[in-house]
Image (cartoon, grey):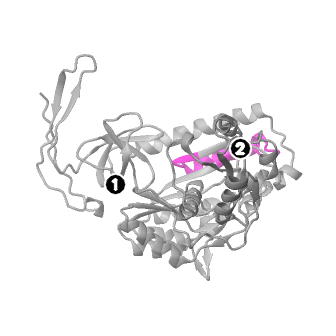
Amino acid sequence: MNVADTEVVLSVLHHAGFEPTAKLEEAELAFMNTCAIRENAEEKVWNRLNHWKSLKKKNPALVVGVLGCMAEHLRKDLLQNADNVVDLVVGPDEYRKLPLLVDSALSTGEKGISVKLSRTETYSDILPFRADGISAFISVMRGCDKFCTFCVVPFTRGRERSRELRSIVDECKELEQRGFKEITLLGQNVNSYDETGLDFSDLLRECAIAVPNVRFRYTTSHPQDFDQKLVDTMAEHDNICKYIHLPIQSGSDRVLQLMNRTYSREHYMSIIEMIRRAMPDAALSTDIIVGFCSETLEDHEMTKSALRQVEYDGAYMFNYSPRPNTRAYDTLADDVSDAEKTRRLQEIIEIQNAISTKRNLLEIGREHSILIEGRSKKQETEWKGRTDTNKMVIFPRIDAEVGEYRRVRIERANSATLIGSLIDVKHTVTVKQESAERGDVLFDLTPHIISSVNEHEHSGIEQPAALLPILQ
């Protein structure tokens, strides 16, 4: 969501005559787009602002701004307690005012704050300023009406409001024309999308039909709004990825009630069964909050059993951190010690890592259509990309380019990554591995094409080429 909002900010500033720079030292404006959902996120912002003090000393005219949820959450604290580093504090619904605020700061040095929440702002008429690439984010709705007792989002991003369906579909078409291959639809609670009676399933279907050669993902869902219609829509369209992030937060009904999660464990598990029936190979991930107010060892064991029952492919797991202005902060005691939270979190992590490893090992021998995202961070000689089910795959950088969909056979796996090999090689290539010490050629690996592959390998038609590696 912060990436998508940053692209809106860049668009607003671009129309005001500003251009982005890769060098912070040369900037006239320096903004941080922030998150306030966890305490750790805010700590990172304060640390970064402390680092920016030196920039401000070298260039007193530099306008520093804090945008987004933390701006909405802390407001005047950022102007008063940041050692005069911060000039502008702008909430997530006030980005249209940035040119005026920036002009005032540059011309008079006046500090500004604009954090009013809106019931209608969706930025649907602003085309985000995106660099060319293969993956893009589209914000389809903003805000949240669920008011979970631990969550600050309704207070920092406001109430739910949805963009017009047609504007979203048009944006998808524009992205396809620019060469984007994958789009993620975003919302704090994306499946509560509602635009004049059209729900998220309707939106997802219209997008999938409008640009059939683009792959779609979405995040994040709330179990209360997840229904059979959405599952059927996902199963019906090949270009809707079979991956669902569905936060459970806790396996204990008592804790779920304290969190105001509005569903029971039984209801949640019925959704999982519904998904498994319609899409047996779909991947699932979740969020877990460990050590919520009054969480007992029995509650903790229920969360552990929920992990084992569902067998998620992945999970985001956190210690509970109280957020000011939330109901839990004001009315519930944070009575689980930090040491105990950490101990319980480690147990959860170990269980999930074992499950993720088990799930990934099942992928060995299978073939996937991979959207190549770029070079692996660890090895320049390897590509990285994701499966339809959002699993990261690493494979040798042979005969493939960024942005292509290519067939890969999985050969090895660990808890986080699948390792495979390209099976639809189209051209004869030579790859040389050289000794780091002497520069000697150790071997040539030359794949020779024996049978052809379908020109549109991402169509799902499996016609792998046989390979004959020749070692010299």
Residue on which disc 1 sits: 403
Q: How many marks?
A: 2
Left or right of residue 442, residue 314 in this image: right
Circle 2 packing at 10 Å, graded few (<14), some (14-19), many (20+), is: some
Label of residue 42 in the image: 2
Question: Mark 2: which amino acid?
Answer: Glu
Q: Position of residue 193 (x, y in %)?
A: 61, 72
Looking at the image, the residue that sits furthest to the front is: 107
Q: Secondary structure at mark 1?
A: loop
Q: Give me the C-alpha separation between circle 1 and circle 2.
A: 35 Å
- Magenta residues, start to end: 288-315
Check whether the beta carbons of the residues at disc 1 and disc 2 lie within 8 A of each other. no
Q: Position of residue 400 (x, y in %)?
A: 26, 48
Instruction: Tell me which residue sits at (44%, 54%) in the image.
Output: 389
Question: Mark 1: which amino acid?
Answer: Gly
Q: Position of residue 339 (x, y in %)?
A: 76, 31
Looking at the image, the residue that sits furthest to the right is: 331
Instruction: Confirm whether residue 229 shows in the render.
Output: yes
Looking at the image, the residue that sits furthest to the bottom is: 196
| Quadrant (top left/top right/bottom left/bottom right) for the N terminus | bottom right
Left or right of residue 366, residue 304 in this image: right
Name the foreground residue: 162 vs 418: 162
Instruction: Tell me which residue sits at (81%, 38%) in the image.
Output: 336
Looking at the image, the residue that sits furthest to the top is: 437
Name the foreground residue: 251 vs 248: 248
| Magenta stretch encompasses residue 302 | yes
Q: Secondary structure at mark 2?
A: helix
